[in-house]
Amino acid sequence: MNKTNRELILAFESSCDETSVAVIENGNKILSNVIATQINSQRRFGGVVPEVASRHHIEQVTICLADALERAKVDYQDLNAVAVTYGPGLVGALLVGVTAAKTVAFAHDLPLVPVNHMAGHIYAARFAGEIKFPALALLVSGGHTELVYLKEPNSYQIIGETRDDAAGEAYDKVGRVLGIDYPAGRKIDELAHQGHDTFKFPRAMLKDDNFDFSFSGLKSAFINTMHHADQVQQQLNQADLAASFQQSVIDVLVAKTMHALRQYPVKQLILAGGVAANTGLRTALGDAMEKYHPTVTLLKAPLSLCGDNAAMIGAAAHVAFQAGERADLTLNADPSLEFDWIK
Amino acid sequence: MIILAIDTSNQPLSVAVLQDNQLLATTTFNYHQKDHSTMLLPLIADLLQRVDLQPDQLDRIVVAQGPGSYTGLRIGVTAAKTLAFVLKKELVGISSLAVLAAPLQPENQNTVIVPLFDARRQCVFAGIYQQKKQQLINLLPDQHLTLAELTAKLQKFPKVILVGHDAQQFNQQLQAELTNKITLATGVFDYPQAYQLGLLGRTAAPVEIHSFVPRYLRVTQAEKYWLAHHQEKLNEPLVEKF
């Protein structure tokens, strides 16, 4: 193997309930992307229990590492750098990946590249096509909902974010009321396609002249509607409930994004994060872009890479590595890490 | 045999490098526990460099496997198992409580040594040990138990030495129950020493690396509750890899 011909990054991700290790070539080619998911375990509790998550990570971390190297058919001396998610996320979970990555970097004297998990989500889109700058990213996941401006490679600035619940969090909470297992996103999405927006739930902050979101009002309106129906022993149509909830989320996400695109002219819009796998959102955003911003390309993270994975961390690390970003062995987990706000 | 020993199981952080049973270098901190993550790897790198060793020259990694602080344990165990795996070295786990018991050599062979950690709410992590013919013997496996349960288990022994920094706070309570039996080891014995850990790990059998995890000795609250309310077995594995 010739290091001058290809740059290989070994990437670790353990911020929530997936342990993942990947080997990425030149920032855009997946040689391996091993993911150990704890969904079956965490489903028992209706959400992610941090201590349980941390315990699973330490069970899995070297197994994922072994598999990732074997599938990629590379050895440590082929690697150019080790990358790791150091935040945001659950601190105990992050620490397993951070400690493992630091140990590999130390043992084989490799550069260590720290990666913000949200930059990773954005760079999942890199596997769908090249990113054209300046770009805007709509990031929607279980922990985050934000609009990020990418002026140039390795530059991330928040222009708006949720003031309360993340969109994915609202899906899980609504899912619980509907009796849908954690994580509820995909099931609600499927159900929504069989119903209609008959309940007309509120669309929060739609008229406000900023790029922030709010989903807790929608969640409350939904729960109140369900409780009221329960009290008067009325049976509500589940598909219509799901469709109404989802339409409200999509309307707000799409409208705020269109508003942001008017203020920040960009070449490309990136859709990423766990909720970016939502088919309703993917379609609605595509339609709106065609109608309002036909010259801006829409780059959607591949469906298989919307959830947490180390391949996206490796892709973001490639850009950071090229920009000279390094961490030393004192690197710590930063559970509340976030991008800077735009000035 | 070159050994690296790591103990991050409680507030003290201790690392040692040994050549067989000789100490080459060691450092012990007893400062903020939250610094384990930032301090452990730099400390290992520094110690090895000062004794002119490359990571690859290590033969065996010995780690305090628990009980102790869950997060603390995971930092040490993750570093130890990853280092052993990537460098293809031997891995050994040793009880964090045994590390505290080992340096004590009671005059009377029947005296038992009880290392303990505070587990809060009148509970402790503790085990019962004894020195027999220069060997540390475990009489009661390390476990999580109430102070009352520990007291009951100690009734039958003529003399008991409590050890560990946390032992001080339970000393009076145990003295009251077990009059004239209890001695408290203090000072140098209060803190785990990675040199001692390395010595214990030198003769132990190496373990399989991938399945090596901390010995928490407690299921999580969430799992305890779930198990109490679900008799049925899960059909699916808890963690799926793809």
Image (cartoon, grey):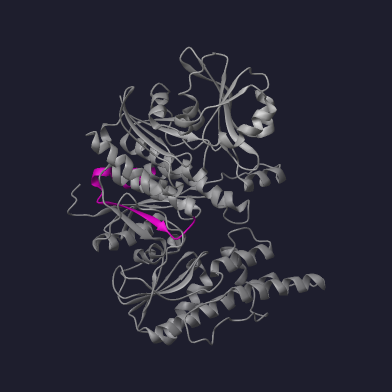
In this view of the protein, which residue sits in the foreground, A178 or B80?
B80
Q: Where does residue A260 sit, x and y in percent of width and height?
A: 42, 82
| Residue A64 occupies quadrant | top left
> Quick check: can you spot residue B32?
yes
- The magenta span reads A67-90
Which residue is found at the position 63% from the left and 17% from the top? B158
Outermost residue toward the top in this view = B133
| Residue at point 60%, 19% (across, down) | B159
Residue B214 vs A278, above or below: the answer is above
Residue B9 at x, y percent in the picture? 47, 39
Q: Position of residue B55 (x, y in %)?
A: 27, 36
Q: Residue at x 46, y 35 (%)?
A: B212
Residue A34 in sight: no
Image quadrant for the N terminus of chain B? Answer: top left
The foreground one among B133 and B231 is B133
Closer to the camera in the image, A106 or A259? A106
Q: Where A189 sits versus B32, above or below?
A: below
Residue A37 relative to residue B1: left or right: right
Left-right relation of A6 to A171? left
